[in-house]
Amino acid sequence: MTTFKFTESVKMSFRSIASNKRRSFLTALGVMIGVAAVITLVALGNGTQKSVEQSLESLGSNLLILYSGQPKGGSLVRRNTTNIQPSLTGEDLEFLESLIPEIIRSAAPESSSSGQIKYSNKNTAGTIIGTNLSYPEVRNFHPVYGSFFSENDLAARKPSAVIGAQIYRDLFIDGEDPVGQKIRINGVSFVVTGIMEEKGSSTSDSSIFIPISTFQKYISGSSMYALINIQAVDLDSMRELQTYIENEILRLHKLPNMDAADFYVANQLDLLNTLQGVTSTFTLLLGSIAAISLIVGGIGIMNIMLVAVTERTREIGIRMALGAKSSDILSQFLTEAIILSVGGGLIGIFLGVTTAIGANKFGGMASAISGESIILAFGFSVVTGLFFGGYPAYQASKLDPIEALRYE
Amino acid sequence: MIKIENLSRHYQMGPTTVKAIDDLSLKISAGEFVSIVGPSGSGKSTLMNIIGCLDSPSSGKYTLAGEEVAGLSRDRLAEIRNKYIGFVFQSFNLLGRESAVENVELPLIYAGIPPKERRERAMEILKRVELQGREFHQPNELSGGQRQRVAIARALAVNPKILLADEPTGALDTKTGEQIMELFRELQSEGVTLIMVTHDPDVAAQAKRVVQVRDGKIVVDLPVGEWIR
Ligand SMILES: Nc1ncnc2c1ncn2[C@@H]1O[C@H](COP(=O)(O)OP(=O)(O)OP(=O)(O)O)[C@@H](O)[C@H]1O
Ligand SMILES: [Mg+2]
C-alpha cells in the first residue's frame, strides 16, 4: 500500500467512524474493556507477587531454619515451636558457629514458650523467645527503641527482655518509656531493654526476646534448642548448604540418614519458589481471563464490521465502479477496523492504568503496572483489529461491482 | 474502439431465463456519438454495464481498444473503469453521505490524484455543469436534476475516453437538458466517444448515430439523418 492510499484510507475511516459516533464507540468499547482488564488484572497479579516476595524477604534473607522434630516437608512459616520437643544441642550450635564467616553468615538459636507478662496492674499473653545476639540480623527484625539485650546479658544469664510492639501497647501507656522498667514473665522479674519494630504479624509483635541462656535457666530448664536460624552467605549456596548441614547434624546426632532424623532443614528458596509459582499462576490466570475479554472485544469488532459491509454494499459498488480496486476496499475497511481497535486500545490503556493506580491508592490493593502488559495488550488490540477486521474487509473487497450496485 | 460480437447476457430466474441481451453485435469507433433507444426492459442498461466493464457477458466477445475484456483481471478492469470510462448511472449512484464535490472527487482518489488538485478539478467540473454554489451540498439536499448533473460531473472528472450516459437528461428540463447536450457535443469535439441511452427521441437525435434495441437485440442502427423516429 502506498502512503497515498494509506492516508486516503485513514481519512475515509475517520469520516466513517465520525458519521456514526455512538456505534463506533460501542464497537471500540469491547477492546477498551479488554485492554483495561488485561492491564489492571496483570497489575494486581504482579502487585500480589511483589508483596508476597517482600513479606518473604522480611523473614530475613538467605534464611535456612534448622528445626527440631521429624522431617515432613519443611516450611519456613513459623510453626508453633512451643509444642515441639527440642532436639538441637549446644554442640549443634557450636558446630554451626564454627562455619562463620566463610560458609554461613550467622546462626541464631531459638526456643520459645508461651507466657504471661505483667507490668504494674496490667497483664498480657505473649510468646517468650530465647535467642542470641544474631537474631535481629538473621530474621531481619530489629529494635526500634532502646536496644536488644547485650553480650553481657547473654553471658551472665541476666533477666533482660526486648518486647514486641504489641506487648508494649498492651502493657504501657502510649509514650511511656519502658526501658529500665521491670516486668514479670511467668512470675520472674525482667528488665526491659528495648522495643522491637512492628512487623504486622501478631506472632512477631506479641513476642518477648530474652537471652537464650536466661530462657534455659528460668523458663525451659533444658539446654536444648527448638530451632536454629541460619543465614547463608548468599542465595546460590543455599541448596548445597542445606545438604551439608543435614549431613553434619546427622553425624553429630549419630543418625544414619534423614529418614531417621530428629531435625529437618527448611530452605527459604523452596518457599520462594512455591510462592512464586503460585503467584505467577495467579497472574497468568488473571491475564488469560483478560485476554478472553479482549477476544470477545475483537468479535464485537468483527460483528459490527460485517454489518457495516452489508450496509455499505452499495457504497462499495459505487467505489468499485469508479475505479476502486479490491485492495482499496480491503484497506479502507481494514483501516477502519484497526482505527477502532487501536483507538479502543489506547483508551483502554488509559483506563487500565488509572484503575490499577486507583485500586492501589483507594482500594488498598497491591498493584504493579507492568510495561510488558501495556505493550502486550496494545499489540493484541492491533492484532485484534487486523484479524477480526480482516475477514469483513476481505468480504467487502471480493464483492462483485454490479451486484453491489444493485443492492438495495 | 468498441467491438461486440454475438454477445448475450442471460439471467437465470428460477426455471425461466431472461435474455437481457441476446446475440447482439455492435461496433463503435473512437470519437462517435451514439444514442441507444428502445423500450423499457429492452436491455439498454445491461448493454451499458457490459460496455463499461462492470458486468460480464454470459457468452460472446467484447473487445475494448483491442483488448479482450473477458481475459482481464479485476484490478485491470477497475483501472480501465477509472482511467478510460466515465459512467453516468440511470440511478445516479451518488454517495449519500458525501457532498457534491466529494462525489466528483471519488474517481480522482482512485486515480491517485493528490487532495488539492482533486478539489480544484472537481470544483471546475461542477462549474461546467452549472452547479456552482451547490458544491458542498449532500445529494439529499439537491434536486433530481442537480443530482443528475453531479453524476455527469463525476463521470467527466477523470477526462474519460468513453462516456457512458444512461438517461443523462431524464431528470432535467428541456433547457438544462439542452445545456448537457451542448456539453456532450463539446466533449465529442474533444475526441471523447459518447454512448447515451435515452427515451426521448429529441435527445436521441442530438447524437450522430442511433441504435435501437428491442428484447436484447439491435433492430435499427442508422446515422441520425436516416433515422425515422
Ligand atoms: N440482475 C438482474 N436479474 C434478473 N434480471 C435482470 C437483472 N438485471 C436486468 N434484468 C432484466 O434484464 C432486462 C433488461 O434490463 P435493463 O435494465 O437492461 O433494461 P433497460 O433497457 O435499461 O430498461 P429501462 O429503460 O427501464 O432502464 C429486463 O427484463 C430486466 O428485468
Ligand atoms: Mg435502463
Image (tube, coloured by chain):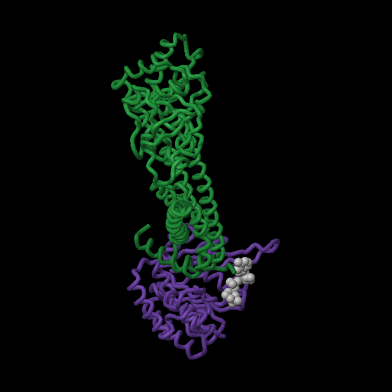
Chain colours: A green, B purple
Image quarter where ligand 1 lies? bottom right
Can residue A257 be seen here? The reply is: yes
Q: Quadrant of residue A160?
A: top left
A235 relative to B225, above or below:
above
**Viewer-nearest residue: B213 or A249:** A249
A1 relative to A249, above or below:
below
Q: In this image, A51 relative to A295: left or right? A: left
Task: Identify the residue at the far front of this view.
Answer: A120
Residue at x-position 46% and y-position 61%: A336
Q: In this image, B43 relative to A181: left or right? A: right
Image x and y of residue B222, in percent: 51, 79
Q: How many numbered circles are shown? A: 0
A230 relative to B202, above or below:
above
Considering the image in quadrants, where does the N terminus of chain A appear?
A: bottom left
Residue at x-position 51% and y-position 23%: A73
**Viewer-nearest residue: B173 or B2:** B173
Image x and y of residue B122, in percent: 38, 77
Residue at x-position 57% and y-position 61%: B58
**Viewer-nearest residue: B228 or A247:** A247
**Viewer-nearest residue: B52 or A75:** A75
Residue at x-position 61% and y-position 77%: B40
Image x and y of residue B84, in percent: 41, 69
Considering the image in quadrants, where does the C terminus of chain A appear?
A: bottom right
Q: Quadrant of residue A347?
A: bottom left
Task: Identify the residue at the far right of this view.
Answer: B15
Task: Identify the residue at the far left of this view.
Answer: A102
Can residue A330 be seen here? The reply is: no
Image x and y of residue A46, in percent: 44, 43
